[in-house]
Image (cartoon, grey):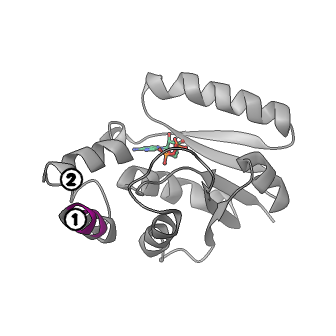
Amino acid sequence: MKIGVYPGTFDPITNGHLDIIKRSINLFDKLYIVIPSNMSKTNLFTVEERINLIKLATKEYDNIIVCATPLLTVEFAKQVGASYMIRGLRMVSDFEYELQLSTFNKKLAPEIETLFIMASHEYSFLSSSSVKEIAHFNGDITCFVPDVVEKAIREKYNK
Ligand code: ADP
């Protein structure tokens, strides 16, 4: 069975993440979307909220499992028997960080390959943080995120 892991913060999931999922899903029998649960970053959504939003946004796929892990993502990948980790690349600025991360991961788990998928041009500028910033200033984010996420962000900022 071909198993892949797509790790990320997903705070929250955007149409850019969904595009990467849509384009990689057929490579695998099972794709884990996994959130590291012990990251120090301060996030708008809790891990549980992020998992729930990803589940709602990907409910059309029956071979996706969404979860959190306290483990390093390569350790998680080993535990679930995955051979591949998926990452998206937007701008040149992503490259340096992703190269460093994938080199570390290769050292820690040589049997796991990182596959990079280039962002579609319409999403190459899109990040979770820009979506939050626009929403914070009451801008229109409907074309950047699924409807469930748009609603959830509005609720957060209107509290
Ligand atoms: P992380 O904190 O791990 O970078 P993110 O949730 O920001 O978590 O992103 C997870 C992965 O998705 C990363 O590989 C990132 O480059 C990729 N990604 C984020 N936004 C996009 C996008 N608009 N298009 C393609 N890939 C993206």
State how many labels appear.
Answer: 2
Amino acid, disc 1: Arg
Locate the C terminus by quadrant: bottom left
100 or 42: which is nearer to us? 42
Q: Which residue is mark 1?
A: 154
Give the vertical position of 101 relative to 145 (above or below).
Answer: above
Residue depicted at x 80% and y 44% = 112
Residue depicted at x 50% and y 73% = 55
130 or 29: which is nearer to us? 130
Q: Is residue 9 left or right of residue 27?
A: left
Q: Which residue is mark 2?
A: 135
Report crowding for label 1: few under 14, some 14 to 19, many 20 or more residues within 10 A (C-alpha). Answer: some
Q: Is residue 21 left or right of residue 64?
A: left
Q: Position of residue 143 (x, y in %)?
A: 23, 56
50 or 123: which is nearer to us? 50
Amino acid, disc 2: Ala
Badge 1 marks a residue whose secondary structure is helix
Q: Which mark is residue 100?
A: none
Q: Position of residue 109 (x, y in %)?
A: 84, 40
Q: Label 1, label 2: how many angstroms apart (C-alpha)?
A: 7 Å
